[in-house]
């Protein structure tokens, strides 16, 4: 277990930011913490990285409490905070070399990762002239140059265009293949569905559901199928679309009859998206502001 | 324990960054420019006055302004968070940033000394006084940087302090008792005094021990205040 958060509570004055949040991330997994702005995602990350102290509960990295031992533990962690930035007047190479010196690690991974994110030819370019997507890639490389075992990303694709986000997703999946454990926060359900082995839904400081995306979809499925069939003769004009409830006893008979008569064209299960499940659980849309 | 390599990394980064930071470069050039103008273009100026003005401007304005801007910019541009999450300790960040300011002040004061053609002995006294006073100024600048949420507000927070430390020592002795009273509590007053005594009256270093002691003590007090504010506030707001 590389990351363990157990019954984490944190309040800012009267506002409860986290109310008993618990989750675990196994080695080699990508875990996605989902929720709208203000749900408590960044607070969880800040506690996990020792930037804030929890009121109660535990935040463990590598089985150890982080607060007070940041220097030792964070050497094995790569972090891309939500509002992180680069030194704009320096080049990509100067930015990365600076962090290489701070971590006292070798040069080799700078070029390796710059190659991987297609920025090797830009390394002498000043950061101020890079696009947001390119900057995000440099931030990711910066978090990787000291060979971390855990990568923590707070809203890594926030504000990126779809192409840049997609390119970043591919890199994250490659990193997972390389054995890096990834914890990311997002309010983009599609992104999380695509990347994560496990997800947790955070809503007003509480983890309202967690599990594998596929299991969540099955658990919160409303058992409906969409059937496309011919009402009469098998010609295009007779095609009819119908949504049926699987737990209705008549549905089985109806579909059996269609199959027997060769009138069925297609059947699709109507599984919910993660966004549908979130709305079902919280009554709120992810685009809403949290507080 | 502080890691020399990490301090060096911060120092190198700051030096690379400052080369294209026009705000700070202008600030570095001003003491040299002022000294040159005062020494060469203002008629009937007492010998050494231009250098004294350039040096006190260097120590107060560069010494305070540069570290305050370096710290406030890290906060404003959100680079401080990643820096704080790296193995760099806050003390190393402070030392790295302060060291750049300290080294550049010493280099510029040497340039000013050479510009006005001072003897080695006088140069030595001035360098020691400049080094001690610049420590005080750098610590004040760091406090201003910590208090200010962004670069713009370093001006609002820092300007009254800069003016107090720069102008009050220069206005003392013109017959305003309040100014004379306040000046005695400012290390920059003793620094200006050292400059006047060495540049104009050519006194020896042995006559200046009290001045040096007061400046060193002020630097120590302001360093303690810096530590206290850091513990209360930290680098991340």
Image (cartoon, coloured by chain):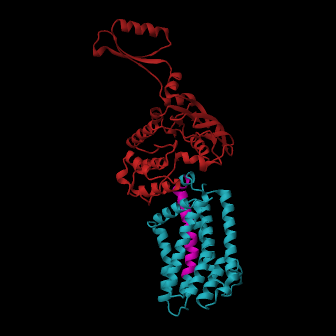
| Closer to us: A211 or A223 | A211
Name the quadrant containing residue A64.
top right
| Closer to us: A234 or A82 | A82
Q: Position of residue B2 (x, y in %)?
A: 60, 60
| Magenta region, main secondary structure | helix
| Closer to us: A190 or A249 | A190
The answer, for residue B78, to whether it is visible in the render is no
Q: Position of residue B29 (x, y in %)?
A: 48, 76
Taking the magenta stretch, the answer to whether it contains residue B105 is no
Tell me if residue B150 comes above or below residue B35 in the rendering.
above
Per the rendered image, the range of residues in magenta is B54-81
Q: Position of residue A50 (x, y in %)?
A: 62, 47
Tell me if residue B135 comes above or below residue A61 in the rendering.
below
Q: Residue furthest bottom?
A: B44
Tell me if residue A257 comes above or below residue B56 in the rendering.
above
Q: Position of residue A150 (x, y in %)?
A: 53, 41
- The colour with which the image depicts chain A is red
Question: Quarter holding the C terminus of chain B?
Answer: bottom right
Q: How many labels were placed on the picture? A: 0
Chain letter matching colour cyan? B
The answer, for residue B90, to whether it is visible in the render is yes
Please give the name of the residue rendered at 53% of the width and 30% of the height, measured from the top-left corner.
Answer: A278
Please give the name of the residue rendered at 38% of the width and 57% of the height, measured from the top-left corner.
Answer: A125
User: In this rendering, would A102 be left or right of B229?
Assistant: left
Taking the magenta stretch, the answer to whether it contains residue B66 is yes
Please give the name of the residue rendered at 50% of the width and 92% of the height, measured from the top-left corner.
Answer: B43
Question: Quarter holding the N terminus of chain B?
Answer: bottom right
User: In this rendering, would B93 be left or right of A7?
Assistant: left
């Amino acid at each position: 277990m590389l990351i363990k958060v157990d019954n984490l509570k944190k309040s800012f004055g009267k506002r409860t930011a986290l109310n008993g949040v618990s989750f675990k991330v196994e080695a080699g997994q990508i875990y996605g913490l989902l929720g709208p702005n203000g749900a408590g995602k960044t607070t969880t990350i800040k506690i996990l990285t020792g930037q804030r102290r929890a009121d109660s509960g535990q935040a463990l990295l590598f089985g150890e409490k982080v607060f007070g031992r940041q220097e030792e533990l964070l050497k094995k962690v790569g972090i891309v905070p939500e509002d992180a930035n680069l030194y704009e007047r320096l080049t990509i190479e100067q930015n990365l070399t600076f962090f290489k010196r701070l971590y006292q690690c070798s040069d080799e991974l700078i070029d390796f990762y710059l190659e991987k994110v297609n920025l090797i030819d830009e390394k002498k370019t000043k950061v101020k002239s890079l696009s947001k997507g390119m900057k995000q890639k440099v931030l990711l490389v910066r978090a990787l140059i000291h060979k971390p075992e855990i990568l923590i990303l707070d809203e890594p694709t926030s504000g990126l265009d779809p192409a840049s986000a997609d390119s970043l997703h591919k890199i994250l999946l490659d990193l997972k293949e390389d054995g890096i454990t990834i914890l990311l926060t997002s309010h983009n359900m599609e992104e999380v569905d695509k990347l994560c082995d496990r997800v947790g839904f955070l809503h007003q400081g509480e983890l309202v559901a967690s599990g594998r995306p596929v299991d969540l979809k099955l658990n919160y499925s409303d058992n409906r199928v969409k059937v496309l069939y011919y009402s009469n003769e098998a010609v295009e004009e007779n095609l009819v679309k119908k949504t049926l409830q699987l737990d209705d006893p008549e549905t089985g008979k109806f579909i059996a009859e269609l199959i027997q008569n060769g009138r069925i064209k297609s059947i699709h299960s109507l599984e919910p998206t993660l966004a549908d499940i979130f709305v079902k659980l919280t009554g709120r849309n992810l685009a809403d502001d949290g507080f | 324990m502080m890691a020399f390599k990490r301090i060096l990394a911060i120092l190198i980064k700051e030096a690379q960054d400052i080369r294209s930071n026009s705000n700070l470069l202008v600030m570095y050039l001003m003491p040299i420019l002022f000294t040159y103008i005062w020494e060469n273009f203002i008629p009937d100026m007492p010998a050494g006055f231009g250098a004294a003005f350039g040096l006190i401007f260097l120590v107060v304005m560069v010494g305070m302004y540069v570290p305050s801007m370096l710290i406030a910019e890290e906060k404003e541009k959100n680079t401080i968070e990643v820096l704080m999450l790296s193995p760099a300790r806050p003390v190393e960040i402070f030392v790295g940033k302060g060291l750049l300011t300290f080294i550049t002040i010493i280099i510029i004061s040497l340039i000013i000394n050479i510009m006005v053609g001072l003897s080695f002995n006088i140069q030595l006294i001035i360098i020691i006084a400049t080094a001690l006073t610049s420590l005080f100024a750098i610590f004040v600048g760091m406090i201003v940087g910590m208090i200010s949420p962004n670069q713009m507000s370093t001006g609002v927070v820092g300007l009254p302090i800069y003016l107090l430390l720069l102008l009050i020592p220069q206005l003392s002795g013109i017959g305003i008792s309040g100014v004379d009273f306040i000046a005695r509590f400012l290390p920059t007053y003793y620094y200006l005094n050292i400059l006047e005594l060495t540049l104009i009256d050519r006194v020896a270093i042995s006559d200046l021990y009290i001045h040096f002691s007061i400046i060193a003590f002020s630097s120590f007090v302001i360093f303690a205040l810096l530590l206290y504010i850091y513990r209360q506030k930290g680098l991340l707001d």
